[in-house]
Each structure stands twice: as C-alpha cells, then as structure tokens.
Image (cartoon, rainbow, N blue to C red):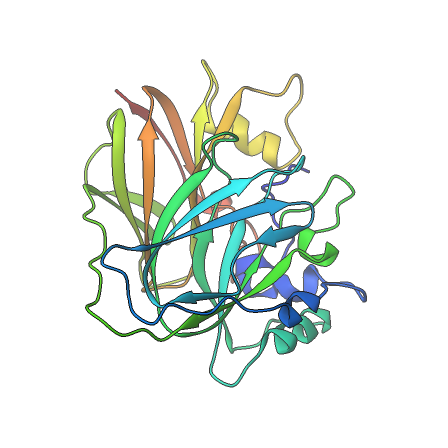
C-alpha cells in the first residue's frame, strides 16, 4: 500500500486508535527547551520552517499566533506530511499521546486544523494558515513500508501557539478558491500555469484534505488512485506530489502557494468517510484537470 493511503481512522475519526500501538508515540519532545515566543506580531506573516525526517519533526515548540506561513521540507528517505491537530483548552500533548493508545474513536477535544502535504522533493511545499492561541500537535500518519504509521514510530511533535500583541497581519490575497465539499473539489475559476495563491476551504459536512498531484504524460487520476490503493498492475505510472492541504474540519481554510507547470494534474481526497469508512475518492472526490 502506498504512503498516501492513511491508516483506516485518520479523518473518518477513528484514526488515532487504528494507528496506535503500545509503544507509540514518544512524548519526550514535550520536555525540550521551548523557544521564547515573540513579544509582538510581525508586520508580515510569521514564517516557520518544518523539516520532516525519519521519524521526527524539526519545528519550534512555540510560535506566535496569527497568520503563519509554513515551509515544509520532507528530507527523509520516506515521504512525510504534517497534520496540525488542535487540542481544546485544558488538554495537553501528553493527553494526546495517551489518547492514541486507547481503542475506539478519537476524543472530541481533538480537531483537524489542516497542515502540510507532500510537496516537491527539492522545493518542498508552502501553506499559510491563521492560528489561534492554544496547544497543537504536528503528526505524520503516513505508514512506512512495514505498514506501521510514522506516528507509531514517534513522529509527533508538540506546538504551542502563543498570544501576541500588535496589529493583526492580513491573510494572503488569493487568486483562486477551491472549496472542499461532500464529495467534490469546487473551483472558483480554472488554474493556469505560473504562481498562484489558492484559498482552500472546507464546506459544511465532513473533514476533507486536498492532495495535489502532477500527472506524467498519459497518466490518469484513476491510475494514481489504483497505485495508491495497491491495486495497479504493471509498472508504476509517472506522477509527483505537488503539495496540498492536510485534513481540515468544516469552516476551516488555508492558503496553498504553488508554481504550476503546464500539464495535467489531479486533486484527490483520501479521507475515510464517516459513514462507510471508504476513502472519499470512492465517493467521487477526485478531479483531473489540465493547466495551460
């Protein structure tokens, strides 16, 4: 099964139990020295670099609230993503680590707030989000070749978003909007070659993710899905990950910063459905389109 295929529970809201094991995940990162939060908001979005390797994130443990641009670099031998989960007031990173070990659905105090998807192996991927103060965690649920999810190997890091003072920073100005609905990717207008700031927003309904894939010549979105689901026969079709936005609950939004080359692309949502557990792509949440 390919790395993009999540363990059964991810956003269908059974993922924490499905991805758990007795020795998962380590929480020693919570005891590391914290980086002091800035005293005031910057005049431009705060920029945070996140580096993912086997099996850990390099990320500051404290960052200021407000508009934040994440530059995500996956530099391990395995692919990685970084899903932002927000903990309700009173809950801690240790509470999350303990909850992962328990069978059953994840706790109601855990929220999917978006995050970073696999991007270009050299340039990485970039997204911008508006963060409210509170406690978060950055998690990778992609499984290793042995089938064990990275979170079960310790790939989970605490992230505290600190209150700030000063003039709020404006969110980026998007030139395209993609709405994630049950079960469709709805474009405000077609995408063209070149640089774009894409606002990705989740409509009322289930959580969704946006995985952007650059298709090789003659490759279809259906072939990508078959490869990801382990049912493709023959040589692996040519395609590359081009970024995206990790699972977000209804009402959330984030901005993708992309520089698209001309060619064919696919958008796919692999989230398990809340009703039948099938990935949303099985309900039609897959779109192939051309960029000129």
Is residue 280 shown above or below 233? below
Relative to 214, is 189 on the left or the right?
Answer: left
Position of residue 11 measured from the top left corner of the image (x, y, whole percent): 53, 59
- Residue at 78% x, 63% y: name it: 21
Q: Quadrant of residue 92?
A: bottom right
Nearest the viewer among 273 and 196 is 196
Q: Nearer the viewer, residue 275 or 99?
A: 99
Q: Is residue 54 above or below residue 61?
A: above
Viewport quadrant of the C terminus? top left
Residue 247 in view (yes/no): no
Q: Across the whole image, how many numbered discs are drawn on residues?
A: 0
Q: Position of residue 197 (x, y in %)?
A: 26, 41
Q: Residue at (72%, 74%) from the top-left corner? A: 102
Left or right: 1 with respect to 289?
right
Image coordinates of residue 230 in percent, x first then y, are: 66, 34
Q: Nearer the viewer, residue 266 or 49?
A: 49
Instruction: Give the vertical position of 120 relative to 256 (above or below).
Output: above
- Say left or right for 69 vs 270: left
Is residue 205 something one can see in this rendering? yes
Q: Residue furthest right?
A: 22
Residue at x-position 64% and y-position 55%: 8
Question: Could you tell me which residue is drawn at 56 percent across and 51 percent down?
Answer: 278
Q: Nearer the viewer, residue 272 or 276?
A: 272
From the viewer's perspective, tell me whether residue 41 is left or right of residue 182.
Answer: left
């Amino acid at each position: 099964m390919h790395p993009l295929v999540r363990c059964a529970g991810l956003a269908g809201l059974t993922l924490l139990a499905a991805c758990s094991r007795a020795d998962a995940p380590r929480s020693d990162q919570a005891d590391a020295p914290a980086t002091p939060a800035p005293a005031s908001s910057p005049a431009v979005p705060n920029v945070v670099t996140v580096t993912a390797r086997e099996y850990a994130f390099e990320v500051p443990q404290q960052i200021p609230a407000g508009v934040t641009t994440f530059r995500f670099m996956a530099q391990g031998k395995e692919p990685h993503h970084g899903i932002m989960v927000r903990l309700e007031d009173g809950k801690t990173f240790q509470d999350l680590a303990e909850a992962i070990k328990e069978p059953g659905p994840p706790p109601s105090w855990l929220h999917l707030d978006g995050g970073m998807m696999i991007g270009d192996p050299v340039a990485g991927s970039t997204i911008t989000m508006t963060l409210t103060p509170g406690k978060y965690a950055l998690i990778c649920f992609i499984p290793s070749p042995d089938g064990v999810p990275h979170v079960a190997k310790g790939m989970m890091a605490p992230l505290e978003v600190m209150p700030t003072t000063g003039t709020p920073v404006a969110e980026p100005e998007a030139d395209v909007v993609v709405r994630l609905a049950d079960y469709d990717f709805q474009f405000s207008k077609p995408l063209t070659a070149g640089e774009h700031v894409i606002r990705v927003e989740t409509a009322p309904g289930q959580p969704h993710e946006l995985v952007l894939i650059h298709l090789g010549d003659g490759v279809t979105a259906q072939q990508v899905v078959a490869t990801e689901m382990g049912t493709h026969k023959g040589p692996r079709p040519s395609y590359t990950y081009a970024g995206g936005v990790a699972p977000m609950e209804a009402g959330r939004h984030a901005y993708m910063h992309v520089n698209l080359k001309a060619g064919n692309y696919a958008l796919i949502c692999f989230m398990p459905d809340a009703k039948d557990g099938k990935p949303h792509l099985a309900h039609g949440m897959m779109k192939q389109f051309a960029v000129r």
